Amino acid sequence: MNADTTQGSSAGPAPSWQEDAGRDLVRSFGDRMALFVRGEGAYVWDGDGKKYLDFLAGIAVDALGHAHPTFVEAVATQAATLTHVSNYFATPPQLALAARLKRLAGTGDAGRVYFANSGAEANEAAFKLARLHGRGTQRTRILALKNGFHGRTMGALALTGKPALQADFLPMVPGVEHIDATIDALEAAVDDRVAAFIVEPIQGEAGVVELPDGYLEAARAITARHGALLIVDEIQTGAGRTGEWFAFQHAGIVPDAITVAKGIGGGFPIGALITFGAASELFFPGTHGSTYGGNALGTAVAGAVLGEIEASGLLANASAREEQLRAGIAGLGSPLVAGVRGRGLLLGVALAHPVAKAVVAAAQEHGLIVNAANDETIRLAPPLIIGDAEISEFLALFGAALATAADALMIDESAAAATEGVPA
Ligand code: PLP
């Protein structure tokens, strides 16, 4: 399929979509793996009409799956009513979403919401919040975790604890230090010159890596003791994906701020910084802004998406489906599976060999979309709407993909019979 029908004329056959992509799209992404033309529920279809079960959901974005009637209706109705007026003005959907996010995050009255257009932008706002907290004081240090991911814009990249992603873009925005993900390392690093500590409750991009037990509780206590902000990056874990609205709520703590994006919009680009308590008073007129941030269309869609997650009990669904997936994956008995990490519908299947890319390719052949978060981890982040049928289908397709990859590796499937279940 050629997107531009004016090209590929009599000189020869029309270029394939791969050629179009290779020529016209920025090279910062690798080769695109497929051309998808349509989606419905937990399924997408490619340009050849092949159907795929989507267990990635646009990297934890399509919370309601594809073309959900609530999403479609919200886009159409708001587009026909009022799309954008700039932040000189307020709109009803923007006010309603701010109030809803405050309620879901549990900020109480003292919370405030800054609307952005992506996760990275939400984290840029969080970075500026930290700077405002340190303004006029010795608080110039910002702490983040090694291997953490917070986005690709320069501030968010500085927060990201992956030197390989930073190397070509030095110098980084100064002041950020990356520490090991242990309570001891945090205790040793935090002093009265720290403005903020930013942390993902589960490190999604690192391969669905959980924090040590009690980490967020300790982080809250340590940062509070030193007057530093605790900022939780809920961009991948938020919007119900882990079985709570936001993953920090499993720990029962109150952070100073959280950043959200991805699932909040269910496919519509939107992000937000949500502040709690005194941190809500740090921004003052002129200190931050965005033309599109919080426009009527985006906030109406996000409001509808969150409303549907709430009305359909999708938090409980995320928890219940986690149990089914864990049991089902263990039941596959694949010698390639070394364990399952994560929570709710953000799961990382740990592989016994570094063959994640081969498993992803085999899955795609079988009609299943999953992601290689790293060489040894398959990330699962399906839409929150999945039910029994999708889980059964997933287990069949994933089992087949693992078998294909194991065959290629010449691993004896029967070895699995000797394995007693799969460690959690
Ligand atoms: N923070 C986390 C935890 C993420 O997982 C991501 C994206 O994967 C981001 C920030 C950046 O979000 P975006 O890609 O919308 O800029």
Image (cartoon, rainbow, N blue to C red):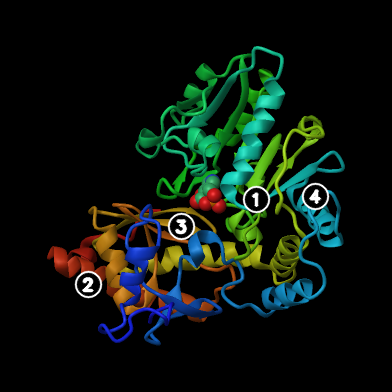
Name the one closer to the observer, 311 or 296: 296
Query: Cβ–Cβ below 8 Å for labels 1 and 3?
Result: no
Report the Cα–Cα distance between label 4 and label 3: 38 Å
Residue 209 pos. (x, y %): 44, 45
As drawn, 260 above or below 232 = below
Residue 82 pos. (x, y %): 81, 68
Between tags 4 and 2, which lies in front?
Answer: 4
- Judged from the image, the secondary structure of the residue bearing numbered disc 4 is loop
Report the Cα–Cα distance between label 3 and label 2: 21 Å
Q: Give neighbour class at mark 1: few <14, some 14-19, many 20+ (Cα, 10 Å).
A: many
- 2 or 1: tag closer to the N-terminus: 1
Task: Answer with left or right where residue 108 lies relative to residue 36.
Answer: right
Q: Amino acid at mark 2?
A: Thr
- Residue at image position (60%, 41%) is 123
- 1 or 3: tag closer to the N-terminus: 1
Q: Quadrant of residue 314?
A: bottom right
Q: Residue furthest left?
A: 410
Q: Which mark is residue 404?
A: 2
Residue 43 pos. (x, y %): 49, 79
Q: Residue furthest front?
A: 10
Query: Cβ–Cβ below 8 Å for labels 2 and 1?
Result: no
Residue that mark 3 sits on: 347
Residue that mark 4 sits on: 87
Residue 258 pos. (x, y %): 66, 42
Q: Quadrant of residue 130?
A: top right
- 3 or 2: tag closer to the N-terminus: 3
- 4 or 1: tag closer to the N-terminus: 4
Q: Which mark is residue 294?
A: none
